[in-house]
Image: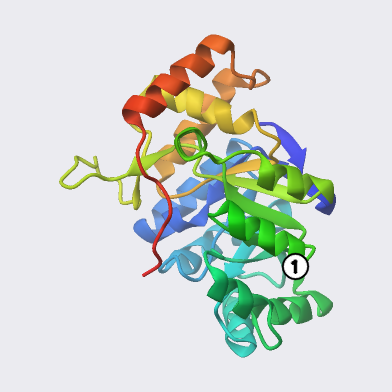
Amino acid sequence: MEYRKLGRTGLEVSIISFGGVMAKRMEQEEVNKAVSEAIKRGVNLFDVGPTYGDAQNKLGPAIEKYRKKIILTCKTEPEKEKKEARADLENSLRLLKTDFFDVYQLHEVTDEDSLKKSLSPGGSLEAILEAKEKGLVRYIGFSAHSEEYALKLMKLYDFDTVMFPINWNYWINYQQREAVINKARETNKGILAIKALAQRRWKENEERDGYKNWYKPLFDNDELARLALKFTLSKDIDTAVFPGDKRMLYKGIDLFETCKGTYILSDSEKERLQEFAESYGGQLYPVVKS
């Protein structure tokens, strides 16, 4: 496994990270095994949140004995009032059997309403700042799925980390470019990439092979999956978070090991990825929150 510094936090994070949402679809013993296997293969960053069903309930017991070895990130919803966000954080600490989070984030800032509510007096960011003063949070970050709101957030508050989709299809077909990365790096913010092995939204009645992600992961095209991961890793990121299904986490680690140290896409690989984007792409975002 390769490790990089998570921006100015100085935290050494594995280039492949564990998306805790996958735990909600697994039995406790299966989660325990998945966590153990991930750590054995060098994964040290685990990300989860209270909106992921019972994922926190299951991840907590699984990571408890490893807590001193891992980096744990969590989140709250940006629309929540201060007291609700504080309750989220305190409940997450209890369920995850920890007394602090390495990074705590505003989750999915997707529109003007969530942006304003999160940063207003009595909003969720205020609760996180108070938690940091008490030593419950080391660093503060956010996740966003739109370039517009990621840039607005960074303009309004100096976050430590940014979680953002850095995905081959999203960038090629929907004109997503380097603006968020470039802005984040101006102040050495850590960058957590998401959706590296996402393809597009599911089509109606499409065969899902047991995957329950809201999007189709790249489970059925190994060439495209390899190029997609290389695309993400070729960008200036610190870690790629793999959520949704343990099979995709293991696939991501396997693919990383085949391309370790050779992340820059060749001209022929870029051409091939462009072809895939035209024939295998499709809408991934925006996500309408339910």
User: Residue 245: where, in percent of width, then height?
Assistant: 40, 46
Q: Is residue 228 depicted above or below 78 in this figure?
A: above
Is 155 in front, or is 287?
Answer: 155
User: In the rendered view, does 285 fall on the left or right side of 123?
Assistant: left
User: Residue 104: where, in percent of width, then height?
Assistant: 67, 66
Q: Is residue 239 depicted above or below 48 in this figure?
A: above
Category of crowding for the residue at label 1, using alpha-carbon neighbours closer than 10 angstroms: few (below 14), some (14–19), many (at least 20): few
Q: Quadrant of the C terminus?
A: bottom left
Q: Is residue 247 depicted above or below 84 in this figure?
A: above
Residue most extreme to the top: 268
Q: How is the image coloured?
A: rainbow
Is 38 in front, or is 251?
Answer: 251
Mark 1 residue element = helix
Q: Is residue 214 depicted above or below 172 in this figure?
A: below
Which quadrant would residue 83 be assigned to in this image? bottom right
Q: Would residue 65 be visible to someone looking at this image?
A: no
Give the residue drawn at x 53%, y 54%: 145
User: In the rendered view, does 186 fall on the left or right side of 251?
Assistant: right
Q: Quadrant of the N terminus?
A: top right
User: In the rendered view, does 214 fall on the left or right side of 273?
Assistant: left
User: In the rendered view, does 82 fall on the left or right side of 279?
Assistant: right
Is 135 in front, or is 111?
Answer: 111
Q: Would residue 164 be visible to someone looking at this image?
A: yes
User: Residue 34: where, in percent of width, then height?
Assistant: 47, 47
Give the residue drawn at x 72%, y 81%: 126
- Mark 1 highlights which residue? 156
Three-letter amino acid code at the position of disc 1? Leu
Give the residue drawn at x 58%, y 23%: 257
User: Residue 183: where, in percent of width, then height?
Assistant: 75, 48
